Amino acid sequence: MNIHFFYEEVDFKISHEKQLTEWIESVVHSHNFTILEINYIFCSDNYLLEINKQHLNHDYFTDIITFDNSEESTQIESDVFISIDRIKENAANLSINMAAELHRVMIHGVLHLLGFGDKSKEEKRLMREKEDACLSLLKF
C-alpha cells in the first residue's frame, strides 16, 4: 500500500482506511497517474500553522497543505497535511458530517496533485465539480 496515514497532535483516527485507499487509488488511476507514495498527516491547527509559516510564509490557519514531491509528471509522491480542527469547524459551519468534509479535503489535495487548481473563479468551480464527482464514487 502506497498511501499512509499519520497523526500529529490530534486525538483522531481515520475510519475505513482500506476503502479510502482504494478510492484514492481509483481516482488517481482514472487520470492516468500512478502513486509512488502519499502520506496523509492528520494534525492540529497549531501543527499545521507552523508548517504554513515555515514553508509558505503564511501566518494563518488552513485546512490542508499539499506538498508535491513528485519527480515525474504522472507519478505522485506527496505529503498531505490536514488540520482536524479546521475540518471539524468547517463541517459545523456548513452543517455537514465531519467525515464528508474530511473526504472532500482529502480528495481536494489529490486533485491538486493531478493538476487541478483553485485560484480563479473558473478553477474553483471545476475543482468543486471534480470533488463532487470523486465523492460520488466513495461507497462504504
Image: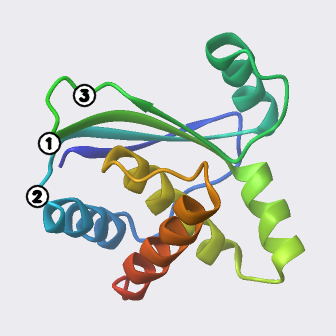
Query: If you read the primary sequence from the N terminus, does the residue marked by circle 2 or circle 3 appear first?
Result: 2
Q: Badge 1 is on which residue?
A: 74
Residue drawn at x 40%, y 82% is 133
Asked if the residue at tag 1 contacts the one at tag 2, i.e. Cβ–Cβ closer than 8 Å, the answer is yes
- The amino acid type found where label 2 is placed reads Asn
Do residues under tags 2 and 3 come within 8 Å of each other at their CB atoms?
no
The spot of residue 1 in percent (x, y) is: 17, 49
From the viewer's perspective, is 58 left or right of 131? right
Residue at 20% from the left image edge and 44% from the top image edge: 2
* Rendered position, 75 above or below 70: below
60 displayed left or right of 105: right
Residue 7, x across and y down, in percent: 56, 39
Name the residue at 77% across, 22% down. 58
Distance from Cα at disc 2 to Cα at disc 3 = 15 Å
- Left or right of 107: which side holds 57? right
Residue type at mark 1? Thr
Structural crowding at the residue carrying mark 3, measured as other residues with C-alpha within 10 Å and reported as few (<14), some (14–19) or many (≥20): some
Res. 72 in view: yes
| Residue extending furthest toward the top | 54
Which amino acid, mark 3? Ser
Density class for disc 2 (Cα within 10 Å; few <14, some 14-19, many ≥20) is few
Q: Position of residue 76 (x, y in %)?
A: 23, 39
Relative to the observer, which residue lies in front, 124 or 1?
124
Q: Is residue 140 visible?
A: no
Vertical placement of residue 98 versus 59, above or below: below
Describe residue 60's horizontal placement relative to residue 140 as left or right.
right
Which disc is residue 32 wearing?
2
Q: Identify residue for label 3.
A: 70
Q: Quadrant of residue 72?
A: top left
